[in-house]
Amino acid sequence: MSHAASSSSSSSPSSSSFGGPASFGGPARQGSGRAASRGASRAGRGTKPRFGFGLVGPRRDRHSVPLDQLEALALPVGDDGMVIGVDAENRPAVLGINRPVPYDITLIGGLWTAQVLALRAAATGARVAVETGRAQAWTALAQAAGGGQPCIALHDVGRVPPQGASAGSPVVVVRDCGMRPPRGRVVSAPWQSVVTLLPYLSPVAPRLLEKSSLVGVQRVSPDEATQIGRIMGLPRHEYEALSTLADGVTLWCTPGDRQFVMTQGTDAETGLLGAARRMD
């Protein structure tokens, strides 16, 4: 995240990768440009479509903008990823979860937030695999997501098969395996992020927090807050606030940034999951 839960999730292919002559059968042969020009002029005199090009479209004059007015064309384009809430200034907080590198996220928080993340990851086009020992808590969500398409799949603990993630078919694995999740068979990889949900700070938490690229912390006890502050190197006023956070509020941390984010469900999410809550 550019603020703790906000960062770009994908890299755009360069123009040389797509659309060049080599992409359509190899280098262009000598004279092919003249042949195309003759074909275009013949198509312009009639209504027959040019092979591979279609009808000649309308012609318009070029538009120009004075240099001093160029800023007026700026578009409010934000970060790339899924919106996970708003920050203290009510600006969207965006998490780039589909990445070309392995990406591990640990969330010490409630099931509600993990399920919202799963739904929103699926909305970006990712396939979501949920590894859980409480399938009944996920069944309604899996059935409702994707409009009938199987975009969220449920698996027993330790039974997640290889997912075959790629740039065209990214995967998010959500591990809801309790206080002591076993080492997973499926780990983070390029275009395959892993989100591990811990209901509270547990003996395995320090290891998970240290290896994670992103950590989310919801309301915890004062003692847990002190331990998390020590592990994450948080300033005192931030880790002391962890025991007073409202439902739906998460402190997202990366090695170089931190951000409090409020996650609010959409109407559809609230209808399916209920209101934001820390406890289940």
Image (cartoon, rainbow, N blue to C red):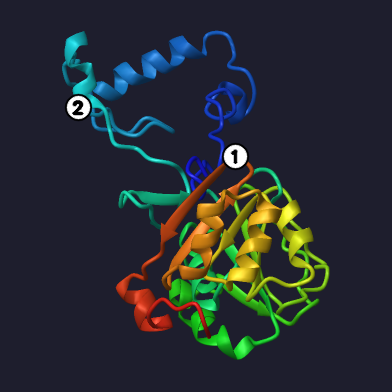
Depth check: give the residue in front, 44 or 263: 263
In percent of width and height, residue 189 lies at 74, 51
Depth check: give the residue in front, 27 or 40: 27
Q: Secondary structure at mark 1?
A: loop
Residue 20 lies, with reference to residue 133, above or below; the image says above
Residue 22 lies, with reference to residue 11, above or below; the image says above
Q: Quadrant of residue 246?
A: bottom left
The structure residue drawn at horizontal position 43% and vertical position 81%, both measured from the top left corner, is 273
Q: Specify the farthest residue to the bottom.
A: 136
The structure residue drawn at horizontal position 72% and vertical position 63%, both measured from the top left corner, is 163
Residue wearing tag 2:
58
Identity, as a three-letter code, of the amino acid under mark 1? Gly
Identity, as a three-letter code, of the amino acid under mark 2? Pro
The structure residue drawn at horizontal position 56% and vertical position 58%, both measured from the top left corner, is 239
> Are there few (<14), some (14-19), or many (20+) residues within 10 Å of tag 2?
few
Residue 263 lies, with reference to residue 181, above or below; the image says above
Task: State the separation of the CA atoms marked 1 and 2.
Answer: 52 Å
Residue 135 lies, with reference to residue 180, above or below; the image says below
Say whether residue 261 is left or right of residue 253. left
In percent of width and height, residue 182 lies at 82, 73
> Are there few (<14), some (14-19), or many (20+) residues within 10 Å of tag 1?
few
In percent of width and height, residue 161 lies at 77, 70
Identify the mark nearer the N-term, 1 or 2: 2
Q: Secondary structure at mark 2?
A: loop
Residue 271 numbered mark, or none: none
Say whether residue 139 is left or right of residue 205. left
Residue wearing tag 1:
256
